[in-house]
Structures are given as structure tokens and as C-alpha cells.
Amino acid sequence: MNTKKKLRQILIFLQRENLNTLALWVLILVAFSAVLVTWLEPDMTLVNAIWWSIVTLTTVGYGDFSPTTGAGRFIAVIIMFFGIGLLGMLSATLATLLISRKMKENKGMSRYSFENHIILCEWNHRSQSILHEFRADSNTEETPIILIAEIDEKPEDDSDLFFIKGNVSEETLEKANLKKAKTVVVIGDDRLEKTARDGKVVLTTLTIESLCPEVYTVVELVDEANARHCKRAHADEIIVGSELSSHLIASSAINHGISRVVSELLSNQYGNELYSIPIPDKMAGSSFIDIFTRMKKEFQSIVLGVQKGKAGELIANPPVDYTPANGDYLIVIATERPGKK
């Protein structure tokens, strides 16, 4: 947005809230009183008179300059009375604006201009857990997150959580500044039955991808059969809740304690965690076994596999002589993100 357009928006805002009129009256009062006092007080220069007018108008009263003639003191009395009224009106207007803005934000009526932020679609207990996981990770603990959901008001007291009321649509996504977002997370609507819930997720994904194909989308489904529809909609990652739970239950029944290990790795709030990190420059061109050994020695982390690019194919447990390409990522287990300062 250019400077001319910004100035125009500021002027429109001042006019709409009547702040321009109040500011004009303040300037007139300061200028008029300064000129009169300069004329009435022989020892008062115009610069000192302007300073005295501002100090008197704001009821600060430093006392470094003051009128000595009767006429000058009469002007001072007028400024004091008018100053209290003008400042009271200005303070009330500003307070009203701040309260209205906060109420609009909490009611989901605002528009945002963040960049590299996260958009979270729908609100339920899983969305709440996702939010807490974001805040437990050093990379996203202060990242602006915009929630789009059909609820009455902002559900969490999080200074970096922002709320837009309504269903996911072109209008609400525009308010959330989708084109500058980094990631969009689409959660299923628990108020709907299984088929309709997945259908809504697919439709939401189509809307997002049609408006901004570059944004990274992570979507949640109930039925694995609907995953192909999300793939056609170009979702980047698809999480099938029922399938994931079934795999975990089966693995825990065969290998006791596996669920506790997986829970620790998936949570950012305690224990070791899973991270995707770029291959360190000093390890570029090395074999997998060399990278594995050096990551353990230098960062106390375990390398599970190599990801082709930021979100490409995962090669789990590669051969010892496998050499990752430039731009590949390592999937590691560590207590904190390797390389973090």
C-alpha cells in the first residue's frame, strides 16, 4: 500500500470518528491564546507563548512561564476551562474507539493484514489442542493465528490469536489475508455427521486452493475414502483421524507402550519431539551414516529419515551410504529444535 493511500485512509478515519474537528479546535485554541498572550504580555515571546498554551491546555502546569497581567490571566482561565472540555471529549473518543475495536475483535468482525501467519478453520477440542501445541513450539509460540469459526466470540485468551466469525468462504478468507498466510489448518466440524463433515472439509480445501494455491494446507478427515477428494483439491497433507487411531491401537496391542512413545513425540509440550530441519550446511554432501552420527554427537538428536524438499517424499531409515540432496530435510527426534540459539 503506497503512502498516498495510507494518508487517505487516515484522513477518512479521522473524519469518520470526528477526531479531525477536535484536533482543529485544539489547534485554534492554542494558536489564538498564544497570539493574544504574546500581544498582552510584554516579556512573552511567541514560541514561549505556544509552549505555555499547550502546557496550560493539558493542565500540566510546569510554571516556567505564566502571564502577569490581568488580561493575560483572563486568557489563561479561558484556556483552562475549554482545555478540560476538549481533552475530556478527546479522551472519551479515543477510549470509545479502543473499546469498540476490542469488542469487534472478540466478536470476530475485524479484518487482518498479517503475513506468514496461520489460519485455523473451525473450533472444537482438537482445535484447542492444536493451538496449545503451536504455543508450545518455539517456532510458533508468537505466530499470529487467525481462527475462522461459526462461534459467538474469541474462545481463548491468547494475545496472538485473532478471530473471524463465520464459515470459511471467500469473504472470511480475504479478511484473514489468505494470500499472505503460511499455513491453513482445516479441522472437521463436529456438529455434522461423518459424511457431511468430510464434505465440508473438501469444499473448504477447494475454496482455499482456488484462491491461493501457494499456501500450505493441512486437513483433517474422518473417512479415509474421502482422502482422494482432498488430493484432487490439492491439499498438501491429509490426516485421517480414524485411520491414525486404528494404527496406533493395533501397534500398542502388539508392542506394549508404543502409544506413550508416539504421544511424547507428537506433543510439543513435554519430552522429546519430532522436527523437520534443513540439513546443516557443514553436513551437505555427507552420507546418511555420517549425518546420523554427527547429529547425535553435536545436537543429541536421532535422525529418523530424509524428506525430499520441504514437504516432499519421506525416505525413512535410508541406507548408510545414502547421500541427501541439497534442499532436503532431516526428520529428527530431539528435546529442542537442533541448531536453535
Image: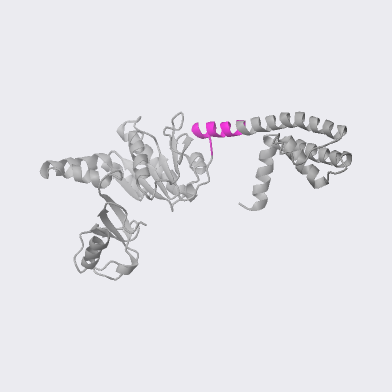
Q: Is residue 24 above or below residue 288?
A: above
- Per the rendered image, the range of residues in magenta is 96-110
The secondary structure that most of the magenta stretch takes on is helix
Q: Is residue 295 above or below residue 52?
A: below
Query: Which residue is painted at 35% across and 40% down in the image?
Result: 132
Image quadrant of residue 259?
Answer: top left
Q: Along the line of sight, which residue is nearer the eye, 218 or 109?
A: 109
Q: How many marks?
A: 0
Q: Along the line of sight, which residue is nearer the eye, 135 or 5?
A: 135
Q: Along the line of sight, which residue is nearer the eye, 234 or 247?
A: 247
Image quadrant of residue 194?
Answer: top left
Colour mapping used in the image:
one colour
- Taking the magenta stretch, the answer to whether it contains residue 105 is yes
Q: Is residue 290 above or below residue 29?
A: below
Does residue 175 appear in the picture of this structure?
Answer: yes
> Is 17 left, or right, of 281 in this rendering?
right
Residue farthest to the bottom?
285
Query: Which residue is painted at 23% across and 60% down in the image?
Result: 296
Q: Position of residue 237 (x, y in %)?
A: 33, 49
Does residue 21 appear in the picture of this structure?
Answer: no
Q: Position of residue 300 (x, y in %)?
A: 24, 58
> Is 215 left, or right, of 30 in this rendering?
left
Q: Along the line of sight, which residue is nearer the eye, 266 or 152?
A: 266
Q: Position of residue 203 (x, y in %)?
A: 40, 41
Image quadrant of residue 276?
Answer: bottom left
Query: Which residue is painted at 66% across and 39% down in the image?
Result: 13
- Taking the magenta stretch, the answer to whether it contains residue 164 is no
Is the C terminus in the top left, top right, bottom left or bottom right quadrant?
Answer: bottom left
Residue farthest to the left?
254
Q: Position of residue 93 (x, y in %)?
A: 65, 32
Query: Which residue is painted at 65% across and 44% down in the image?
Result: 9
